[in-house]
Image: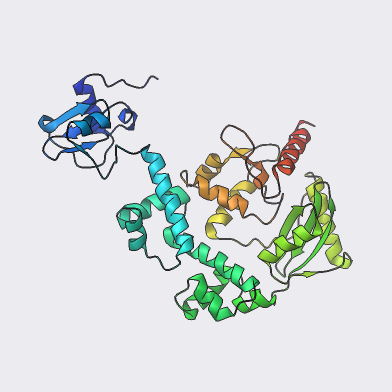
Amino acid sequence: MKNPTFITDEERWQAVLARDPRADEQFVFAVQTTGIVCRPSCRARHALRKNVCFYADVHHAIQAGFRPCKRCMPDKGNPQEQKLAKIEHACRLLEQDPTLTLEKLANQVAMSPFHFHRLFKSVTGMTPKAWQQAARGQRLRTALAQGENITDAVLAAGFPDSSSYYRKASDTLGMTAKQYRKGDVAVRYAIDDCSLGRCLVAESERGICAILLGDSDTELTEELATLFPKAERVPLEDAFALRTHQVIASIDNRAVPLSLPLDIRGTAFQQRVWQALRDIPCGETASYQLVAKAIGKPNAVRAVAGACAANKLAIVIPCHRVVRNDGALSGYRWGTERKALLLKREAEHQEG
């Protein structure tokens, strides 16, 4: 279906009344009583028709003495891109300043707190508060892994006081700060060869908590240390060796199911994304957009990509099955070459 052309003033006025975004690149309208020029899709209250005139673009309207609307900003780029840029900027601000309130953050991006909160959640799939808490958790993990004093690490991470942290300790780290720093929660691991290179398998008392792929033992050990500081490497023997070989057998051959218990740690949003990934059949792929729709957050494409990148259980949670809208391979935590190999192998298995 062809897009309308909005040639006559009546067609343009109807587009303004409908706030039709398809008209945004074709003309602007100016309100003579206020001296403001807007996009057709502007959400501001409509003026009377007799006070409205039309221009081919915002530059002609400005030359005629009108000033750009501060709400729809017709002198700026695409409105949707502007919104995404604002949310991206807000995410960076939340990560840099752990004390930002909703009101201060909304003010930084020139929006009302209500509209900012709604837009932020629609784009990221998380509230600003949840994003802030996730950033705090990451700062806390980094500080504790570096051996900082617990109180100093908690305050530096952005928690207003120690008591507010301890109320949410399990949600933030999956354990207490003392356990995280000292490694009191027993996590042991082993590294062995698999068809994709070297494979690290780690388990806690709850189950398999990490499956990492890499080219060297040093690389894998350093990656695990960011997740579970002071995890202990153990020899490949006894029952743990059997479980490790079960994991590797499942990686090397998707026809071999993994029936071991898993210790899946992540935010509520990440858990929803990871479950959606496990629902993608072997031999098939899905776009980030489709995964976002599957969890009921169609605008949270970037947040879905972030959850894929945070996956700690390679292959078992198949983030390698997520691709771009055009089918092209996107980033993969353990390398796009491994991703391509996995998808090829799974496709061949389905054909066979």
Foreground residue, 318 or 64? 64
Instruction: Identify whether 317 is placed above or below 267.
Output: above
Q: Quadrant of residue 16?
A: top left
Residue 4 seen in the figure: yes
Is 15 positioned to the left or the right of 334 in the image? left
Q: Position of residue 44 (x, y in %)?
A: 22, 42
The way the protein has been coloured in the rendering is rainbow
Residue 121 seen in the figure: no
Q: Position of residue 158 (x, y in %)?
A: 48, 71
Q: Quadrant of the N terminus?
A: top left
Instruction: Identify whether 92 is placed above or below 178.
Output: above
Is 325 positioned to the left or the right of 236 in the image? left
Residue at 43% x, 52% y: name it: 89
Is 172 positioned to the left or the right of 258 in the image? left
Residue at 75% x, 34% y: name it: 350
Q: Quadrant of the C terminus?
A: top right
Residue extending farthest to the front is 63
Q: Position of residue 137 (x, y in %)?
A: 55, 67
Is 127 positioned to the left or the right of 156 in the image? left
Q: Position of residue 334 (x, y in %)?
A: 71, 49
Residue at 51% x, 73% y: name it: 156
Instruction: Identify whether 84 is placed above or below 130.
Output: above
Residue at 33% x, 32% y: name it: 21
Instruction: Identify whether 170 is placed above or below 85.
Output: below
